[in-house]
Image (spheres, rainbow, N blue to C red):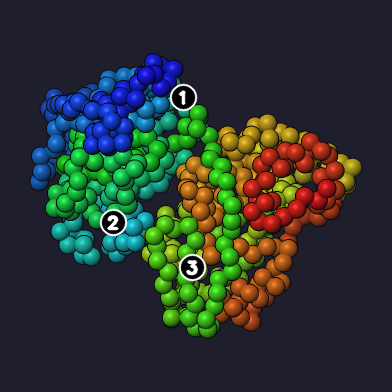
Amino acid sequence: SEVDESGRSLSDYVSGRGSAIRSDEALTHMNVAVEHVEPVEILSQTAPYECDGDSLTQQLDWSNTSKYSPYGKCDLDVVDDLTSEQYRRDYFATGKPVVLRNFVDPDARCRARRDRFVNWSGRKQVSVGPTAYPQITGSLPCQRRQTIDELEKSAPCQEYPGVAVYHAEHVESSAEPLRLEKSKYFQNLSKMLNIDSGFLTSKQLFYGGDRSGAALHCHSAAFNALYIGIKDWFLIPPKHTALSGMPAEKLWYEGHYREDHVLRCTQNAGDVILVPDGWGHSTISHGFTMGLGILYSDAQRGRRRHDVTERPTERPRERPSRRPHHHHGVGDHEAGEDGDEASQKIIFVHVNKVGGSSMFQALVDNCRGKHLNGRGFFHGAAQYQRHEVGDSAFWDAYRFGLVRHPWARQVSNFFFLIGMCRGRTNLNCKSRFIPKYGAWMQDPELAVPAFHKWIRALHKAYPVGAKDEYFFGCLPHGNEMFPWFNSTQVSWFIDGTGKWMIDHVYKLEEIKTGYAKLQEELPCLIGSELGHEKSLEYPSNKLFFHDAEIQEIMDMHFANDMRVLGYEPWY
């Protein structure tokens, strides 16, 4: 029987290349027999490549020596082009990955030719590790950084003998050497996916020598464009995926895994692979490889809003020098004890406009060496910080945050942004409709209507569920890579299932007693006082919420905060 508007049956969904439902599961759970489909043959590229009038090798003069032969096939569909309608119908709706063959245009690929890229990089030394982001899985990067010449030759790292190391970095549009957003292929891809540059949530430049690659991991929807080399992909459907710190070579060539749940695919230079939400994937390079991995928000998915029903309870204590860890929302992670107070580490989730700068400074002044989230991710949500410091360090730390009445936070945000945008005309100020600084700010008869106008404009531009709804309450600060991050304070503290990732939240309104309790948890703060943040003077918070429409808008955006954090409306 038909199950969708395209007239497809259940059998259509689970058959064909790239299905997330494997054949054994289809038969066992759905009583659907799936016929085997042969993989697509992937031909090697040997013809010379023209760049700026020069005839180069397919590797654009980078090394192509490899210890292993590539798979040479693909268990996914491989197509030369797709319309937006075809992509939506055949891959987005079915959750299947797909390969766009030779999709990167020559002008874009030629930006990665060896002489041009080395001229850009200047042979600077970059961080390397056994995997792209070793901290995510509790590993450490190599102590010694490497030049791109060393990476090309698969130079060893003292800490990981025999492992080909890899480099990956988050890059901004202005500093990104391959100029994705100016390329012809990105314009074509944007039309296909119905996105633009504003939908790109994380842009990563990667490169490494033979046998290097990305460890098994998963994230939101992404596309991966290979500019140089050949990569073998190993993809696992969302139901079976996992996170592994094992280098890709050891996992796939030396390890043991269940082959019927792993899809393989060889990606040639110029190919783009579209990976849907939640699919696990890992890669291995054959020769030197370079490309871009881009996470993006899909226009039709928007922001997830989890129905969070509880918040962290206060942690029971035994004695000051030993405290049990109670990990909220971490699946099967078991509680342990940290008996060494001197080694205690701290994760502070700094939500904007809740008094967090004073808390951050108190930690810097009094808890040196313990505070894990430095200026590098000043406003990193819990999941972002876990991503940066790795699982082991994150779950072993004491994790906490500050919160504030959502309505008071929004008023504070309004006047803070006016001060920040004073004399500036940058995009953030324009896109968030910030009025000009002036004496009117202290006059309730002028300030209140201005605030109401601002709230209405924000709500119209960034409604609940929109891909960029977080702009209603804050800048994304890199947290937008997580689809559940939105304008609420709660979204800073939870994981992708809506479970809490921190030990405790303290209310700004109760900070005197809260700071005393925090000092019990963090002895490094004993004897210190929490400073007070300087702010602009403006009318009383409660004057701004007599308007029923404004109350309704605030409730739409912040109902989760009000309910979960225990706040009541003022009217």
* Mark 2 residue crowding within 10 angstroms, few (<14) / some (14–19) / many (20+): many
- Examine the image and state in which quarter residue 71 appears: top left
Q: Nearer the viewer, mark 3 or mark 1?
A: 3
The residue carrying mark 1 is 194
Q: Identify the residue shown where x is 65% and y is 32%.
A: 461
Mark earlier in primary sequence (2, 3): 2
| Closest to the observer, 273 or 44 | 273
Which badge, 3 or 1, is on the more N-terminal residue? 1
Name the mark on residue 70: none
Q: How many marks?
A: 3
Tell me if 202 is positioned left or right of 240 in this view. Answer: right
State the separation of the CA atoms marked 1 and 2: 34 Å
Residue 247 coordinates in the image, percent (x, y): 23, 54
* Crowd rating for badge 3 (residues with CA inside 10 Å; few <14, some 14–19, many 20+): many
Q: Is residue 299 left or right of residue 281?
A: right
**Residue, disc 3:** 326
Q: Which type of secondary structure does the marked residue at label 1 adopt?
A: loop
